[in-house]
Image (cartoon, grey):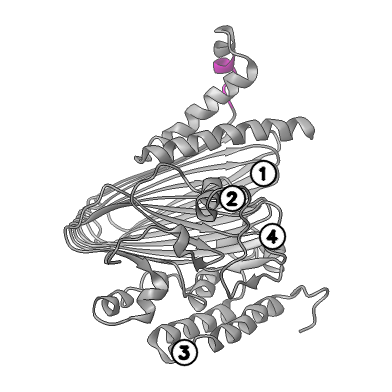
Amino acid sequence: MNRVSGIPRTPAEQVEWYVGHFKSFEKRLNGEASSDVHTLRRRALDRFSGLGFPGTRDEEWRYTNVSPFVSIPYEPVSEPGGRRVDGGGSPATKFLEGIAVRGLPGYRLVFLDGHFAPDLSRLPENGAHVRTLSGVISASEGVNGDLMGYLGRGAEKDRENPFTALNTAFLREGACIHLPENFHSDEPVYLLFHSTHRPEPHCSHPRNLIVAGPGSSVPIIEEYSGPGNQPYFTNSVTEIFAGRGSRVELDRFQHEGENAFHVSSLYITQEADSAVTVNSVSYGSAMARHNITAVLAGEEAECTLNGLTLTTGTQHIDNHTVIDHATPNCASHELYKAILEGSSRGVFNGKIFVRRDAQKTDAKQTNKALLLSDDATIDTKPQLEIFADDVRCTHGATVGQLDEEQIFYLRSRGLGPEDARDLLTNAFASDVLNRIHLEPLREHLQAILHVLLCKGRILAENE
């Protein structure tokens, strides 16, 4: 491979970089290389090789140029370890204090650089409903075999996304949550994916599978974090299958390091009378791309997508959503908000499809952006494609700055300019944050929002 300083320069070299690592990955699988799962991996690698990484000429990536990031030679982390723990106390406790949301009950699965960390995790004794994906793959018999039948079914429909194909090629570890029929839990399952300090740019490809049986319910948290002083790449895929009458709430947020490249893809398939709510909060990484695809495949299904993005400096965060109304009498609600400072950039592209037979569809999509700087930009593209005639569908987008009259009113009541600005910005964000039902997580994110607003002011003053 002709590379300068070990950097894959051309699109072909970028693909070959991962093909070479796949061959090394394949050699470490032992007997698993002949399994059905590995056949899925090989097909995905072939698809990735054929697609390559996207460019700005691709319509779905028109506003997001990933070229500077995919040219970095990220090394897969083949073995766990390497976490840095400073200070006293037990290593596990001290490590979690710095990265995890405090006060959360329920089960916790922690993954470091894509590898499961049992000493940091809290699993059920029998492992019945919450397990690692690698454990399910290794014991693919009985119930595990049934679960493996779901793996890849949601993502398979997105055949033009090279990052999903790349994740599937390297799928090995992540969380597997299986809720039996009529199983209910108010306590969350907390999934924490953390990238550690390492000497070289590194990558991980977490894969999560969530299967909610008929009539079941559970809250789930996905968190992605990492160090701020080195480049790394997180490429995650989560598949949710919501059975008839099930209820799933997923709160996902990423605060990757300032040099990180983050891509996440979420695929939701809903049966009749199911309800899935996803609250997405994103404020980390140098560049992030979040994809959500939801298929309402049974009548009376309901899908709710809420999102909040906060960018500062030169950050770039892109949100792409697709809600496919494939059956009649379904509802979807979508609210995405963005707060942009400095010279950062945001993207929102939301599509709603209403199929020909999907009569009585009720769909609403709203996108609002608040620009706190003259140099911040947002590209917003709400879309409706309706092929049925008895529907109620609306969409809208607004972009603006803080209302000077409102600032004047607050200042006339004794608030300083910064306090007035923060109060209005927090009110804008709270419309999304207040939809998060888990109080410890909601308070955690509200505190981070306050810190980031202060950071944004400091950056603006130093420019």
According to the image, label 4 marks what residue?
Answer: 231
Whichever of labels 4 and 3 marks the residue nearer the N terminus, that label is: 3
Residue 353: image location, x then y, percent: 37, 57
Q: Which residue does the image show at 67% across and 67% down from the upper left? A: 70
Q: Which mark is residue 317?
A: 2
Check disc 2 and give the amino acid type.
Ile
Element assignment for label 1: loop
Residue 348 visible = no
Check disc 1 and give the amino acid type.
Ser
According to the image, label 1 marks what residue?
Answer: 344
Assess whether residue 121 is covered by the magenta stretch: no
- Comparing marks 3 and 2, which lies closer to the viewer? 3
Q: Which residue does the image show at 36% across and 73% down from the upper left? A: 153
Residue 55: image location, x then y, percent: 65, 66
According to the image, label 3 marks what residue?
Answer: 33
Whichever of labels 3 and 2 marks the residue nearer the N terminus, that label is: 3
In front: 406, or 37?
37
Q: Main secondary structure of the magenta part?
A: helix
In front: 267, or 101?
101
Magenta-highlighted residues: 402-407
- Comparing marks 2 and 4, which lies closer to the viewer? 4
Assess whether mark 1 and mark 2 are in contact (beta carbons under 8 angstroms): yes
- Please rate how many residues cluster around mark 1, counting C-alpha atoms within 10 Å: few if below 14, some from 14 to 19, many from 20: many
Q: Which residue does the image show at 59% across and 29% down from the upper left? A: 401
Left or right: 377 as drawn, with respect to 129 = right
| Residues at marks 4 and 3, CA–CA distance in whole angstroms | 31 Å
- Please rate how many residues cluster around mark 4, counting C-alpha atoms within 10 Å: few if below 14, some from 14 to 19, many from 20: many
Check disc 4 and give the amino acid type.
Pro
